[in-house]
Image (cartoon, rainbow, N blue to C red):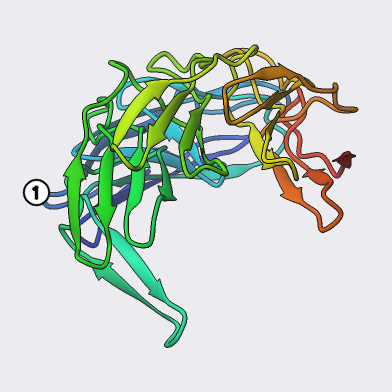
């Protein structure tokens, strides 16, 4: 394993998983003021095809992600890599800092807006609520605590923290703007990685949150599409920590009314939903129960 600093706001470590062996070792330490990776190890030195591997990382001052699969990782808590089929190298990236960037299409450049945000976070959502402001909701802070909601103005480079409507974590959820301008915060996972069924609605006029009609099924890693009559179709996702995706859907209206939608042909999660010009919704890809990517699409009409 090799650990090294990455600018001032990230630290990176690499570990290889081989069916005939596994790398190990030590490395340098990033500056104390930034993220640090103290340990990144696997539970065994070698594996056979089809076996599971456990990776454990110990780090501080940041939020960890394992690549190439973009797996969130908590310091000191093992992550299981299921069903090994080939040699693979995982990279642990730990980042911190409440920073954002803005893209200017006129000159094709990004500009770092340092220090404008009040809370560093990951696994959150952000959605524009008017001409200037962006609602940033949920996710984890660098020390894995619930991140409070934040209203951000990237033009003025100012932000305002809001009182969270719920005491715990909501991460990997969906934020969707309704036809009336309100923002629905749907699904996601709590601090125990259990999918959530209780939505909230954000009112941009009052900058306040209120409870919304509960979803019939707790969902995370799902997708949402807007129908031509302004209702939302909630599609698939996972409904438990262990297990594959669901083939169920729900339809939610602006006034909170909901009903079960049709069952999909395939259960899936981490997929996409795209509105078509015809008014239909195209559901593409995602992972199936075996966590293999699927080359399958279906249309809701």
Residue occupying the point 53% across, 24% down? 187
Residue occupying the point 32% across, 55% down? 133
Q: Position of residue 129 (x, y in %)?
A: 40, 50
272 or 158: which is nearer to us?
A: 158
Q: Position of residue 5 (x, y in %)?
A: 24, 56
Q: Position of residue 283 (x, y in %)?
A: 79, 42
**215 in relation to 126, above or below:** above
**Label total for image:** 1
**Residue 29 in view, yes or no:** no
Residue furthest to the bottom in view is 107
**Residue 17 in view, yes or no:** yes
Q: In the rendered image, which quarter is residue 202 located in?
A: top left
Left/right placement of residue 242 relative to residue 182 reads right
Q: In the rendered image, which quarter is residue 155 located in?
A: bottom left
Report the residue marked by disc 1: 33
75 or 45: which is nearer to us?
A: 75
Q: Position of residue 19 (x, y in %)?
A: 64, 34
SS of the residue at dot 1?
loop
Q: In the rendered image, which quarter is residue 270 located in?
A: top right
259 or 63: which is nearer to us?
A: 259
**133 in relation to 142, above or below:** below
**158 in relation to 73, above or below:** below
Q: Quadrant of the N terminus?
A: top left
Residue occupying the point 38% across, 36% down? 203
Q: Quadrant of the C terminus?
A: top right
Q: Residues within 10 Å of mark 1 (few under 14, many from 20)?
A: few
Left/right placement of residue 201 relative to residue 251 reads left
């Amino acid at each position: 394993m090799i650990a090294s600093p990455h600018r001032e706001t990230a630290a990176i470590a690499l570990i290889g998983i081989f069916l005939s062996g596994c790398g190990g070792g030590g490395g340098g330490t990033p500056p104390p003021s930034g993220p640090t990776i103290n340990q990144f190890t696997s539970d065994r030195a070698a594996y056979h095809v089809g076996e599971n591997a456990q990776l454990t990382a110990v780090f501080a001052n940041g939020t960890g992600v394992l690549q190439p699969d973009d797996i969130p990782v908590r310091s000191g808590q093992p992550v299981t890599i299921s069903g090994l089929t080939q040699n693979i190298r995982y990279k642990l990236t730990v980042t911190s800092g409440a920073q954002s960037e803005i893209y200017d299409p006129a000159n094709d450049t990004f500009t770092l807006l340092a220090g404008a945000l009040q809370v560093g976070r990951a696994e959150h959502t952000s959605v524009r609520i008017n001409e200037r402001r962006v609602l940033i909701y949920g996710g984890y802070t660098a020390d894995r605590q619930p991140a409070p909601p934040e209203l951000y103005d990237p033009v003025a480079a100012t932000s305002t923290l809001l009182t969270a409507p719920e005491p715990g974590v909501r991460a990997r959820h969906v934020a969707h703007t309704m036809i009336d301008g309100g923002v629905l915060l749907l699904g996601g996972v709590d601090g125990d990685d259990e999918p959530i069924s209780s939505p909230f609605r954000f009112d941009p006029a009052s900058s306040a949150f209120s409870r919304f009609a509960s979803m019939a099924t707790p969902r995370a890693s799902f997708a949402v599409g807007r129908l031509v009559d302004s209702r939302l179709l909630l599609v698939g996702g996972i409904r438990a920590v262990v297990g594959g995706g669901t083939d169920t859907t729900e339809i939610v209206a602006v006034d909170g009314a909901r009903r079960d939608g049709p069952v999909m042909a395939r259960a899936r999660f981490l997929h996409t939903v795209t509105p078509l010009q015809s008014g239909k919704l195209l559901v593409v890809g995602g992972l199936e129960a075996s966590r293999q990517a699927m080359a399958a699409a279906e249309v809701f009409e």
